[in-house]
Image (cartoon, rainbow, N blue to C red):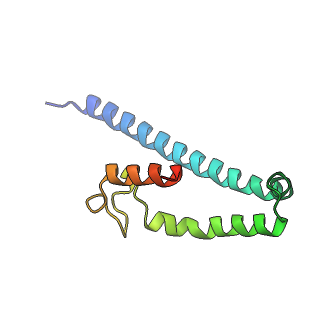
């Protein structure tokens, strides 16, 4: 039998974990946005380093930002099993991981 005191402790611990998860996800989102925003200040340096025009680098950043919702829609990460286009049952994780590694390696 569960006493009200031990149930209150369990609820308190659960709420603390939920709060920590929300804080961690907010900080992750914030740092991701900050990282992308900092790139806008470095367009000239990036263009110079890669020998490209500033307009090409800016256009690439614009495309990257525009494609984020598309990536979220077709996400194949295990944590996104409720994805609209490719749920985990359709695209097994091993096959997707293998494809990702092979395509980035160029083989």
In the rendered view, tell whether residue 63 sits above or below residue 103: below
Residue 103 visible in image = yes
Q: With 33 as the anchor, is 11 left or right in this view?
A: left
Quadrant placement of the N terminus: top left
Q: Farthest residue in the front direction? A: 107
Foreground: 68 or 92?
A: 92
In the rendered view, tell whether residue 11 sits above or below residue 86: above
Foreground: 6 or 21?
A: 21
Q: With 29 as the anchor, is 71 left or right in this view?
A: left
Residue 79 visible in image = no
Q: With 11 as the anchor, is 44 left or right in this view?
A: right
Task: State the image coordinates of residue 62 (x, y, percent, origin top left).
Answer: 69, 69
Q: How many marks?
A: 0
Task: State the image coordinates of residue 49 (x, y, percent, origin top left).
Answer: 82, 51
Q: With 99 as the anchor, is 41 left or right in this view?
A: right
Foreground: 57 or 34?
A: 57
Give the residue at x 28% y 29%: 5
Task: State the image coordinates of residue 43 (x, y, percent, origin top left).
Answer: 81, 58
Give the residue at x 47% y 52%: 107
Task: State the image coordinates of residue 64 (x, y, percent, origin top left).
Answer: 63, 64
In the rendered view, tell whether residue 76 sits above or below residue 69: above
Give the residue at x 51% y 69%: 70
Give the residue at x 43% y 61%: 75
Q: Quadrant of residue 41?
A: bottom right
């Amino acid at each position: 039998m569960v006493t009200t005191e031990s149930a209150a402790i369990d609820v308190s611990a659960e709420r603390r974990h939920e709060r920590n998860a929300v804080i961690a996800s907010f900080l992750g989102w914030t740092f991701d946005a900050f990282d992308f925003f900092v790139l806008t200040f470095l367009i000239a340096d990036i263009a110079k380093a890669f020998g490209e025009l500033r307009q090409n680098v800016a256009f690439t950043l614009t495309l990257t930002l525009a494609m984020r919702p598309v990536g979220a829609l077709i996400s194949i990460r295990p944590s996104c099993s409720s994805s609209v286009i490719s749920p985990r049952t359709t695209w097994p994780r091993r096959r997707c991981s293998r494809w990702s590694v092979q395509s980035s390696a160029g083989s």
